């Protein structure tokens, strides 16, 4: 089947298509001069739906959907994601779009800046604020990461619609088991080296969390200096950073079908956001983080300085899985053999903020 790769950048959305994941056709910019903070490919419906959250420096943030793979888009007259007037807040950006499980084919979640979670029951067209998380007593103390205070990870549980996990910078991981009626901080074992108490209940700067496709209570997290695994749906975390050249970075991607296989793109440190040794390498674990191997065949061999952001790395749902990442210098690389070898898909794009891929 053809694969569609959606590439969100600081100056528009680019769509790349390929029949064999070898040669790619890359479109021109859609929504030019808009920053595409989030994009999703909802393949639960007969015709896949594209969803995009973007922001204009002039017009502000908005949201659009496409049911014909980006040939046309629906932009509602009224903002589909908006804070109630009594919150005193206004939407700055949609950082994450997350379709729910197959049992809820019309449910889509959106994580935003400022840190809030919205839910849609009509396939991502209209949204309502999940008020109990917004009203959580911890919220006044949530900090702001370098990119802003935002919920950037939303992980609905595939087997239990009442369970949803979110992560934010900076605030940490929060979970609900009752469909959003109550929320608990779930950061036990995650260090926050930038705080006086390095093991607080909340306040950690989580960068990304991924869910195992076979054992859904197993989670993998890339934090601000820390790489972790949880085997109990986020209640407790243990370090899996041994074997990586650094425990700093943003991306964390799980294999779409195989348990224990994950990909990561380390950076040297928070104050030195370059790849370790200035080499372009993706790291893969096949045993849930117990060991790691560097993958670089086909990637640039010389000095390499660009970073990869939290949502600028993904896997598709083909077999074998394809893996993709985009850089802050506007290059996009892909692998059609789960990271064993890589090829250039696009170059000279604007700063890549997010990528998503799926068979269509």
Image: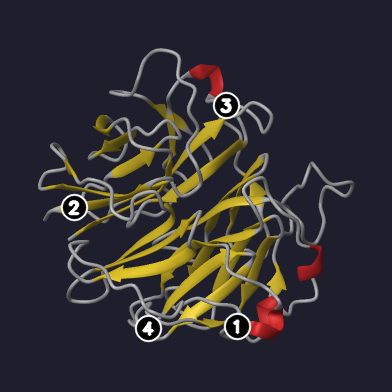
| Badge 1 element | loop
Question: Which badge, 1 or 4, is on the more N-terminal residue?
Answer: 4
Question: Which badge, 3 or 1, is on the more N-terminal residue?
Answer: 1
| Badge 3 element | loop
The residue that label 1 is drawn on is 180
As displayed, is residue 360 above or below residue 308? below
Q: Position of residue 174 (x, y in %)?
A: 66, 68
Residue drawn at (26%, 30%), measured in percent from left and top?
344
Gap in angstroms between the C-alphas marked 2 and 1: 34 Å
Question: Which badge, 4 or 3, is on the more N-terminal residue?
Answer: 4
Residue drawn at (63%, 72%), measured in percent from left and top?
175
Question: Which badge, 2 or 4, is on the more N-terminal residue?
Answer: 2
Q: Position of residue 240 (x, y in %)?
A: 60, 42
For marks 4 and 3, give the one nearer the viewer.
4
Choose top left, top right, bottom left or bottom right for residue 358: bottom left
Choose top left, top right, bottom left or bottom right for residue 144: bottom right
The answer to whether residue 84 is visible is yes
Q: Position of residue 55 (x, y in %)?
A: 47, 58
């Amino acid at each position: 089947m053809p694969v569609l790769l959606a590439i969100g950048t600081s100056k528009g959305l680019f769509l790349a298509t390929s029949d064999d994941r070898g040669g790619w056709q890359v479109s021109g910019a859609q929504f030019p001069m808009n920053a595409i903070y989030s994009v999703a490919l909802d393949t639960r419906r007969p015709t896949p739906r594209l969803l995009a959250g973007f922001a204009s420096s002039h017009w502000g943030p908005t949201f659009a959907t496409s049911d014909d793979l980006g040939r046309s888009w629906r932009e509602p007259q009224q903002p589909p994601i908006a804070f109630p007037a009594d919150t005193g807040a206004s939407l700055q950006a949609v950082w994450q779009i997350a379709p729910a499980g197959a049992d809820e084919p019309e449910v889509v979640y959106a994580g935003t800046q400022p840190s809030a979670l919205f839910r849609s029951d009509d396939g991502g067209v209209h949204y309502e604020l999940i008020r109990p998380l917004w009203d959580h007593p911890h919220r006044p103390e949530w900090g702001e990461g370098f990119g802003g205070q935002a919920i950037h990870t939303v992980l609905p549980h595939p087997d239990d619609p009442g369970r949803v996990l979110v992560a934010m910078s900076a605030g940490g991981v929060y979970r609900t088991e009752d469909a959003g009626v109550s929320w608990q901080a779930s950061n036990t074992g995650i260090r926050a080296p930038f705080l006086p108490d390095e093991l607080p209940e909340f306040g950690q700067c989580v960068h990304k969390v991924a869910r195992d496709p076979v054992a859904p209570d197993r989670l993998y997290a890339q934090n601000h200096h820390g790489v972790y695994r949880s085997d109990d749906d986020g209640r407790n975390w243990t370090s899996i950073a041994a074997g990586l050249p650094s425990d700093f970075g943003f991306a964390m991607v799980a294999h779409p079908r195989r348990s224990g296989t994950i990909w990561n793109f380390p950076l040297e440190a928070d104050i030195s956001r370059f790849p370790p040794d200035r080499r372009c390498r993706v790291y893969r674990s096949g045993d849930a983080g117990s060991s790691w191997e560097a993958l670089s065949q086909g990637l640039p061999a010389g000095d390499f300085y660009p970073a990869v952001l939290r949502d600028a790395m993904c896997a598709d749902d083909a077999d074998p899985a394809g893996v993709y990442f985009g850089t802050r210098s506007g290059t996009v690389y892909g692998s059609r053999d789960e990271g064993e070898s890589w090829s250039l898909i696009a170059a000279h794009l604007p700063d890549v903020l997010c990528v998503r891929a799926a068979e269509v």
